[in-house]
Structure formats: structure tokens, C-alpha cells
């Protein structure tokens, strides 16, 4: 049975606890939490660790972001090591709360932007380095008992690994010694996949979590994505994890997020 979640930055509130209470009241099962490095405090981390106990809302995904986050492919060794440490720090939190954490090839705007070019294959050197990092972080996750996933990101925000097929090819090169799943993000898929539902079916056995956002990166129902077909595909592959909102809210979240929770539950049940 799929469970629905919402990312903390989408929810109004002056604390994670206040946000979690709203998420629960609106009908969500869990919350994904991103904490910017400059806001990291012992008090905030304690709030993350006790969130489920205090509110009944699980943290399904957790990451430290900001600063050198996702610059693990940088040529500067100090930046690279700092970026890898973000993953290690996130894993330590995930170990305590049973959450998933994720990696992409990188996450920053492309310059220059690719206009008509398809994504170029990784060089042998870049592939070897990314596989090294994936194995390093994946091994750390496995030792901690933490689920770890690779996210496909569209060509405008990363140079490589843009599709679910790209993820599978990379993951197969580190399996079975390193266990890595896939995060399928509907917004990125709307740009890169020929058929989103088929790509989901082809990724059976790899999927760890689904990020939800329309083709215009707004709430489901405010764009052109065929959510019934996507959820039907997820049912076909017996996906029973979290489908998590990670998108913009085109209006008052106090009104639109509970409406979206109801929309998701209805669409999933009918798919």
C-alpha cells in the first residue's frame, strides 16, 4: 500500500513539529525533511529525532542540504570531501529515525544550458569516480542499515544520469556488493522519459521512493501529468513505499495541500 508524504519546506510553520502536526491533520502519512547546513543545530536535530514520537508523523526521507551539498563530483578535493560528508552526516540521522537518503550525479544548473543536445555519456574517468563515490556512500548506508537511493535528475540540472534507465545501468555496476535503489521524480521524468508509466514498470525491483511534482513542478493536478497511469504502473510493480510531494504550491498551502492529499488518495485508490 503506497503511503503519501510531503516535504517540510512546502509546509508553513515555525518549527518541524508544527509542520508535522499540519501534515498529519491534512491526511499525509509522513514528512520528508531537508535541513540547510547553516540552520543545523543540536536543538533542530533533536526535534527531527523525536518528531514521530511527538506527532505520530514519520520522517520518510532526510538530507542535509545547502553549502557544498551535491558537489561530490567537483574537481576541488576539499569541496568534494565536504560534499561527501553531507551524505555521511545524513546517514547518521537516518539510522536513528529509519529514513531514506539520496544521491544524484550532481545538482546545479547547467552552464551553458543544453538546448537541443541529448545528454552526453559520462567519460570513463567521470564514471569511475562516480561509481567510487556511490559505492563509498552506499557501503556506509548499508553498514548503518539505511536505505540509499539514486535520483535521476533532468538534463538542465545535472550533466549525467537523467533517466531511470541511466540509474539502472549505474546501479547494476555496483550491485550486489552495494545496495542502491532509485528515486523516480515525476517532474524530472516528465522532461526526460518517453513514457513515464513504462519507465516505472521497467524499474521494478529498483524503486525506493517516488517524488511527486507536475510537469511544471507544481502540485499534482495543476499540470499535464497522467497520475492515474503513473499510480497504475506503481501498483503493477507492487510499489509499497512513499510517494512524496516535492514541488511548488500555486496558492495557499493551508488550502491546497490538504486538497492535494485527498486528490492523491483518491487517484491512487482508483488507479
Image (cartoon, rainbow, N blue to C red):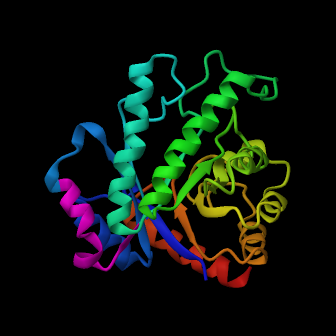
Nearest the viewer among 166 and 217 is 166
Q: Which quarter of the picture shows residue 47?
A: bottom left
Nearest the viewer among 146 and 157 is 146
In the image, residue 170 above or below residue 20: above
Q: Which quarter of the picture shows residue 11?
A: bottom left
In the image, residue 53 above or below residue 201: below
Q: Quadrant of the C terminus?
A: bottom right
Residue 236 sits inside the magenta stretch: no
Residue 51 sits inside the magenta stretch: yes
Q: Which quarter of the picture shows residue 265?
A: bottom right
Where is residue 138? Give x, y as percent.
53, 50
Where is residue 116? Give x, y as percent.
82, 23
In the image, taking residue 75 as reference, residue 235 lies left or right, namely right
In the image, taking residue 17 as reference, residue 146 lies left or right, namely right
The residue under the point 37% across, 50% down is 90
Q: Is residue 134 visible?
A: yes
Residue farthest front in this picture = 177
Q: Quadrant of the N terminus?
A: bottom right
The residue under the point 76% across, 22% down is 115
In the image, residue 271 above or below residue 213: below
The residue under the point 31% across, 80% down is 56
Q: Main secondary structure of the magenta part?
A: helix
Residue range of the region highlighted in magenta in the rendering: 44-59
Amino acid at each position: 500500500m503506497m503511503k503519501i508524504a510531503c516535504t517540510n519546506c512546502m509546509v508553513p510553520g515555525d518549527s518541524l513539529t508544527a509542520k508535522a502536526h499540519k501534515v498529519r491533520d491534512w491526511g499525509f502519512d509522513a514528512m520528508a525533511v531537508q535541513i540547510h547546513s547553516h540552520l543545523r543545530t543540536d536543538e533542530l536535530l533533536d526535534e527531527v529525532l523525536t518528531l514521530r514520537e511527538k506527532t505520530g508523523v514519520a520522517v520518510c526521507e532526510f538530507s542535509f542540504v545547502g553549502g557544498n551539498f551535491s558537489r561530490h563530483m567537483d574537481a576541488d578535493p576539499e569541496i568534494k570531501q565536504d560534499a561527501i560528508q553531507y551524505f555521511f552526516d545524513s546517514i547518521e540521522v537516518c539510522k536513528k529515525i529509519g529514513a531514506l537518503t539520496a544521491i544524484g550525479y550532481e545538482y546545479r544548473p547547467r552552464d551553458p544550458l543544453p538546448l537541443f543536445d541529448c545528454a552526453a555519456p559520462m567519460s570513463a574517468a567521470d564514471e569511475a569516480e562516480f561509481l567510487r563515490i556511490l559505492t563509498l556512500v552506499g557501503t556506509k548506508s548499508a553498514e548503518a542499515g539505511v536505505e540509499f537511493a539514486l535520483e535521476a535528475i533532468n538534463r538542465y540540472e545535472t550533466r549525467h544520469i537523467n533517466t531511470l534507465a541511466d540509474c539502472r545501468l549505474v546501479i547494476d555496476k555496483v550491485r550486489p556488493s552495494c545496495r542502491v535503489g532509485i528515486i523516480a521524480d515525476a517532474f524530472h521524468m516528465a522532461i526526460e522519459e518517453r513514457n513515464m508509466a513504462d519507465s516505472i514498470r521497467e524499474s521494478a525491483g529498483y524503486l525506493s521512493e517516488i517524488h511527486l511534482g507536475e510537469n511544471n513542478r507544481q502540485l499534482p493536478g495543476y499540470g499535464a501529468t497522467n497520475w492515474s497511469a503513473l499510480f497504475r504502473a506503481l501498483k503493477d510493480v507492487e510499489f509499497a513505499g512513499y510517494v512524496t510531494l516535492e514541488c511548488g504550491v500555486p496558492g495557499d498551502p493551508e488550502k491546497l495541500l490538504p486538497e492535494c492529499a485527498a486528490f492523491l488518495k483518491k487517484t491512487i485508490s482508483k488507479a
